[in-house]
Each structure stands twice: as structure tokens, then as C-alpha cells.
Image (cartoon, helix red, strand yellow):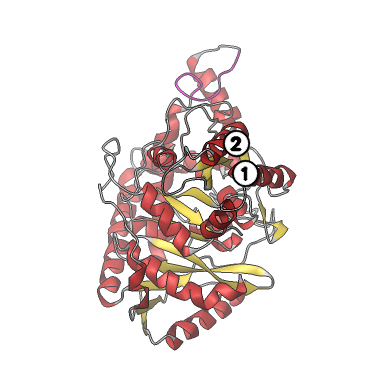
């Protein structure tokens, strides 16, 4: 994997144009399928600008990959779907504007589960993303392309989006660092929505300092996003040496392989002299069900616009409105997207709205309260990021089994708090991630704790 410091060190003796060309050579030979669209000509022109001293900013000359649900002006943005196969946005997302302002070099758009609906990146219209540690296994989802391109040395930094774990899952499976920020810290302007009240754009990288750097760039005020809190972020690594109070979430666990590694991590944490205790979150037994009711309900509403007239691909042969609408959506959406639209439409329908959706909102409140209560006694909470190691492609054929894989990650999105996945070693040659959670807008606590632990586990990566 390539860190920002390593890239900058090479830039001192080599041309940026040559280094970026080298990256594209690796991407074009790759079997990972991490990218949907490459911006080779644009990226190389930006590299030439850097070599001429014309590119300035915090990310000057640093190659960044962008998830394909984030709008990029003049660059195809598909959401991993046939529905938007040829869509070219006329504007940049807020985070992309920030990248360009700081001199980043955008390599391309990364592969993803269709409309961010999935845990494996197997639902992408453009094919499955493969794990950089085992090509027969998944890279995680929905930001699988962003995780795989980092693990496979095909980018230095990447952006993902996280609705129920979609940054943390591929970070865990691909052995990289990724953080879902506090809801509202990063503008959602230009993010093609899946579930508005849950999702956040977030940074992914090969080390904690690089994630913090990218978060500094993309966080902050944006009046175009009504959910934006207008809060800037500045990383303060000096607090990494403090004595953290660490809570272990009783209800978050994994299988034998994951739990075994997690227990070893807990012993390391105790060995650092931190105060460690166990916390219980009673509401978590309902969190997964509540999440999927809320998420699919919002998805049903958001995806109603894709009708072949307002948005989405169009058919050559016109018909009655009902038949045309149905045919466009039948051909344009994959099976998982159709399933979630149907679930969401049912949950929001007359007679069932109060029975399901309103109850899910009440559970969401209970989850948030449980986190707030636990974080009064502890600075950070920890748990395994994912309940299993990366599974083989095709192994999760049952949708319900796939949904259950999100059991450790969805409560964070319901509560809107920040959470980071940190690589903490290998089991059976596959990476394992530690999930670190903090209070609202306490990203600095989460990152400092992760930075402290990273020193302990860096030798294994």
C-alpha cells in the first residue's frame, strides 16, 4: 500500500507524470476490477501541472480515487447501475470541489454495489470487485472499489460513502483505514442518495494520518446541503498519548476467527494502560431491522425519480406511461435494488407506515440514547468491524444472510456518530478490522486512539 508520505518522498526525485503513469499501468493490468471509469488524460494533465509547479494545496500531486456515486463534472458517474450507465454530471460534488482546490489528482471512479445497496460489491452492473489479498473473495461493500484500489496499490487516497457500513466494511476486508464521519460533518451535496438520513461521504487511506488529512480537506461548511453542520475539522495528533477510557460493546461480536483476534487486540489495549470496561446496548437487538426499514423506505422515495424521463436510461420505443415506466425500471435496476425498493414501498404504504416505519424511528432514538449513555463513561467504544473474514465470491447468495453482515456497523449510522475501521492483523491470511466509535463530532478522539493503536499493529501490515 502507498501512503501520502511515501508518495511525496518519491515526488522529490521523480516526476509526478511518471508516477501517475505507473499507477495507470498497474490499474490497467489489474484483476481487481476496482474502477468503473478512469480519468487518465485528465489525471496526467494534472500531473504535468504539478511538475510545472502549477498545482498547489494540501493534496498537491496526490492521486485520489472517487466512489462512483459522487458527482464529478464531465466524468461518467454510474452508481454501479445500468440505469445511469451513460450519465455525465454537469457539476462537481462539494467534496470533489475541495479535492480540486487542494491540488488532488483524480484517477477515476471506483466500482460499487448498485446504488450503494450491498455488502460485497457483487450487485454492481460492472462486475464484482475482488479482494487484493485473495482474488476469489469479495472486497466488501458498497465502497468495495475504493477499498480494493488502496489495498492493491492503485491509489493513494480514496473517497467512499457509508449508509450502514459501506466505508468500514471494505476497509476491514481490504486491510485499510476508513472513517464514517459524524452525520453533517461532510457535505452530502453531489452524493447521489440511497438513504439521506443515514449516509455520509468519508475518507479511506492506508494509514490513520492520511485519513485525517483527507477528512480535513472534505469536512466543513456548505450552504447547499441543509444537513451540513458547518463544522470544520482539524486533526490534533498530540492527544494520541492521552490515557483513553475504552468501552467494549457487548452486543457487537463476530465468528470464532474474528473474536479470537479481537480478544488479542483487547489485551494490547489493556497493556497500554488504558481503562477498559464492557458496555451493553440493549437496543441493538432491534437496530438491524430498524435500519433496513428506514433505509429501504428512503431508497424507495429517492429512486422514484429514475423513470427514463427525468433520470435514467431511455427506451427507443415509447408506450403508455405505466408500461414505459415499468419497463425502464425493470431493465435498469438490478435484483437487489428492486428488492429494497419493494421493501421500502411496502413499509411506507398506507396501513403499514405506523406499524413499521414509525417504530423503526423510535428504535433509532433508543440506539442514539444508548450510545450517548455509554460515551459519558468512555472516550471511545471498540468492537470488531465485521463479524466475519472476507467471504468467497458467491458465498452470500441469501439476501438475509448478507443483511446480517451489517449487524456491527448499522447502529453507528442510526445514531449519526463517527466510527473508524483500523486494520489490526491477519487471520488465515486475511485482514481483520477493529471498529472504533466516538461521540458526535469527536473525530479527533477516534483518530487519536486509532493512531495510538496503529503503532502497535503497523508491523503486521
245 sits to left or right of 96:
left
Residue beneath the point at 54% across and 82% down: 264
- Residue 75 among magenta residues: no
* Secondary structure of residue under mark 2: helix
Q: Earlier in the sequence, mark 2 or mark 1?
A: 1
- Cα distance in 3D space between marks 2 and 1: 7 Å
- The image position of residue 192, as x and y in percent, is 44, 37
Residue beneath the point at 62% across and 55% down: 139
Residue beneath the point at 54% across and 72% down: 254
Specify few, some or many for label 2: CA neighbours under 10 Å numbering under 14, 14-19, or 20 or more: many
Tell me, yes or no, if residue 169 can be seen here: no
* Secondary structure of residue under mark 1: helix
Which SS type dominates the magenta stretch? loop
Q: Residue tagged by mark 2?
A: 44
- The image position of residue 376, as x and y in percent, is 25, 73
Residue range corresponding to the magenta coloring: 307-316
Residue nearest the observer in this picture, 326 or 268: 268
- Note whether 243 is above or below 192 in the view shown: below
- The image position of residue 253, as x and y in percent, is 49, 73
Do residues under tags 2 and 1 come within 8 Å of each other at their CB atoms?
yes
Looking at the rendered image, the quarter that the C terminus falls into is bottom right
- Note whether 87 is above or below 238 in the view shown: above
Q: How many marks?
A: 2
- Note whether 342 is above or below 272 in the view shown: above
86 sits to left or right of 295:
right
Specify few, some or many for label 1: CA neighbours under 10 Å numbering under 14, 14-19, or 20 or more: many
Q: Which mark is residue 20?
A: 1
Quarter residue 233 falls in: bottom left
Amino acid at each position: 500500500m502507498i501512503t501520502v508520505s511515501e508518495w511525496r518522498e518519491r515526488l522529490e526525485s521523480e516526476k509526478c507524470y511518471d508516477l501517475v503513469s505507473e499507477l495507470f499501468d498497474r490499474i490497467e493490468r489489474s484483476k481487481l476490477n476496482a474502477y468503473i471509469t478512469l480519468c487518465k488524460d485528465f489525471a496526467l494533465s494534472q500531473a504535468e501541472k504539478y511538475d510545472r509547479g502549477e498545482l498547489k494545496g494540501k493534496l498537491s500531486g496526490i492521486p485520489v480515487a472517487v466512489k462512483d456515486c459522487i458527482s464529478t463534472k464531465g466524468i461518467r458517474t454510474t452508481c454501479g447501475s445500468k440505469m445511469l450507465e451513460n450519465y455525465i454530471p454537469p457539476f462537481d460534488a462539494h467534496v470533489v470541489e475541495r479535492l480540486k482546490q487542494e491540488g488532488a489528482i483524480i484517477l477515476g471512479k471506483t466500482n460499487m454495489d448498485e446504488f450503494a445497496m450491498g455488502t460485497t460489491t457483487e450487485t454492481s452492473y460492472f462486475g464484482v470487485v475482488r479482494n487484493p489479498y485473495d482474488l476469489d473473495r469479495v472486497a466488501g461493500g458498497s465502497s468495495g472499489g475504493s477499498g480494493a484500489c488502496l489495498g492493491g496499490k492503485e491509489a493513494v487516497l480514496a473517497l467512499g460513502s457509508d449508509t450502514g457500513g459501506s466505508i468500514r466494511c471494505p476497509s476491514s476486508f481490504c486491510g485499510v483505514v476508513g472513517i464514517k464521519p459524524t452525520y453533517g460533518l461532510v457535505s452530502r451535496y453531489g452524493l447521489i442518495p440511497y438513504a439521506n438520513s443515514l449516509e455520509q461521504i468519508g475518507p479511506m487511506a492506508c494509514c490513520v494520518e492520511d485519513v485525517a488529512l483527507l477528512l480535513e480537506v472534505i469536512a466543513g461548511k456548505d450552504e447547499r446541503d441543509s444537513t451540513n453542520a458547518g463544522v470544520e475539522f482539524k486533526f490534533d495528533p498530540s492527544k494520541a498519548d492521552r490515557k483513553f477510557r475504552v468501552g467494549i460493546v457487548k452486543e457487537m461480536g463476530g465468528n470464532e476467527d474474528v473474536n479470537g483476534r479481537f480478544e488479542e487486540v483487547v489485551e494490547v489495549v489493556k497493556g497500554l494502560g488504558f481503562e477498559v470496561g464492557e458496555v451493553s446496548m440493549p437496543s441493538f437487538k432491534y437496530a438491524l431491522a430498524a435500519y433496513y426499514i428506514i433505509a429501504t423506505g428512503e431508497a424507495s422515495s429517492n429512486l422514484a425519480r429514475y423513470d427514463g424521463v427525468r433520470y435514467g436510461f431511455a427506451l427507443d420505443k415509447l408506450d403508455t406511461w405505466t408500461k414505459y415506466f415499468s419497463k425502464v425500471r425493470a431493465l435498469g435496476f438490478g435484483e437487489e435494488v428492486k428488492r429494497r425498493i419493494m421493501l421500502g414501498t411496502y413499509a411506507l404504504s398506507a396501513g403499514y407506515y405506523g406499524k413499521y416505519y414509525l417504530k423503526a424511528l423510535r428504535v433509532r432514538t433508543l440506539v442514539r440514547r444508548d450510545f450517548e449513555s455509554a460515551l459519558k463513561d468512555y472516550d471511545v467504544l471498540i468492537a470488531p468491524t465485521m463479524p466475519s473474514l472476507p467471504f468467497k465470491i458467491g458465498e452470500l447468495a441469501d439476501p438475509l444472510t448478507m443483511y446480517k453482515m451489517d449487524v456491527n456497523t448499522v447502529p453507528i449510522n442510526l445514531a449519526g456518530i463517527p466510527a473508524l475501521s483500523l486494520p489490526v492483523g491477519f487471520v488465515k491470511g486475511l485482514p481483520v478490522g477493529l471498529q472504533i466509535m466516538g461521540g458526535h463530532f469527536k473525530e479527533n478522539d477516534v483518530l487519536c486512539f486509532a493512531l495510538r493503536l496503529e503503532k502497535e499493529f503497523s508491523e503486521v501490515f
